[in-house]
Amino acid sequence: MTTQGKAKIRITHAEPLGQGARLLRVERADGAALGFAGGQYVIINTGVTLPGGKLAKRAYSLLSSDAEQRAVEIAVKRIGAGPGSNVLNDIAVGGELEWSGPWGKLRLPDGFSGRALVVATDTGITAALGIARGAAAAGAERLDLLWLVESDAYFVSERFVRDRLPAAAHLSIASGFPPVGHPERPARAAAIAGELFAAGPCDAILCAGDGAVLYPLRDRLVSLGAPEGGVVLESFFNNPLKKSA
C-alpha cells in the first residue's frame, strides 16, 4: 500500500543520459521507505519561485521496481530554461529537496497476472519502466510495452530502456513518431497500438505521456473491444481535462 505526504529527499547518485538528460538516484533524508508502486510519480519542489510568485513544482515518474522501497531512480530531461528540469540537471549529489507523493493511478492491481499492454509516448517511458519492473517483481506473466518516440536522442536511449526491462516484458519502439503537436500523432498511435491489441486479449491497458495522443487512443482501443474502464491513462502534458476545467 502506498502512502502520500511530504518528505525531504537526498540525491545519492547522478549520471548523464546522453545530451540534455540526467539519471538521479534519490532516497528519503530520514531513511524511511518511500511507499510507492511502479508507475506512480512524485512532485518535486525545486525551490525556484516563478514570476507569478508560485514555487516551481514538477512531477517525475519513478522508474524503479517497487520491490525496492529505500531508494528510487528518476530521469530528468532538460527542457529549455524550465526551472524544474534545470535545477534537477544541475543539483549536486548530496543536495536535498522536498517532494510530495507518491501519486497516480497508473499501476497494475496487486497480484496481477495475465497480459498487460503499456503504451508510452515521449518521456512517459519512465512511468512505463516503473510499471514493467513492478509487474515483473509481482509475477505478471506477460507485459507488452510500446514506446512512441521521435528519436533515440529525444530522452533516454533504447539501450537504457532495454537494460532495465525485465525478461517478461516485450518492447516495441515506434521510433520516428511525429513530434509533439504534430496532427498525425493520434492516428499513428491508434494504428500501431491497435495492432498490438489485436495480437491477443489484454487483462489491463495502461497509457502514459501526451494526453493529446492518449485520449483518442483510448477511444480507439475501446472501439476494438477493450473495456472502457480497463484503459487507464496518465497525461503528463496536453491533458484535455485540465484545459477544459
Image (cartoon, grey):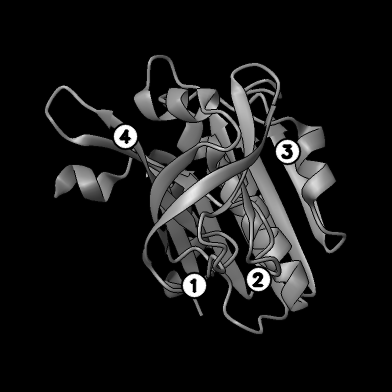
The answer to whether the residue labelled 2 contacts the one labelled 1, judged by CB atoms less than 8 Å apart, is yes
Residue type at mark 2 is Cys
Q: CA distance from mark 2 to mark 1?
A: 9 Å
Label drawn at residue 78: none
Instruction: Give the answer, above or below, for where 54 lies relative to 150.
Output: below
Residue of label 4: 47
Residue at the right extreme? 167
Which residue: 82% across, 34% down?
159
Q: Earlier in the sequence, mark 3 or mark 2?
A: 3
User: Could you say whether the residue bearing mark 3 is in a helix, strand or loop?
Assistant: strand
Q: Earlier in the sequence, mark 3 or mark 4?
A: 4
Pick whichever, 241 or 29, lies toward us: 29
Residue of label 3: 173
Q: Nearer the viewer, mark 4 or mark 1?
A: 4
Q: CA distance from mark 3 to mark 2?
A: 19 Å
Residue of label 2: 202
Residue of label 1: 230
Q: Position of residue 213 (x, y in %)?
A: 44, 41
In the picture provided, is 93 more to the left or to the right than 41?
Answer: right
Residue type at mark 1 is Gly
Instruction: Give the answer, above or below, for where 138 lies relative to 18.
Output: below
Q: Nearer the viewer, mark 3 or mark 4?
A: 4
Residue type at mark 3 is Ile
Q: Position of residue 205 (x, y in %)?
A: 57, 64
Q: Earlier in the sequence, mark 2 or mark 1?
A: 2
Q: CA distance from mark 1 to mark 3?
A: 23 Å
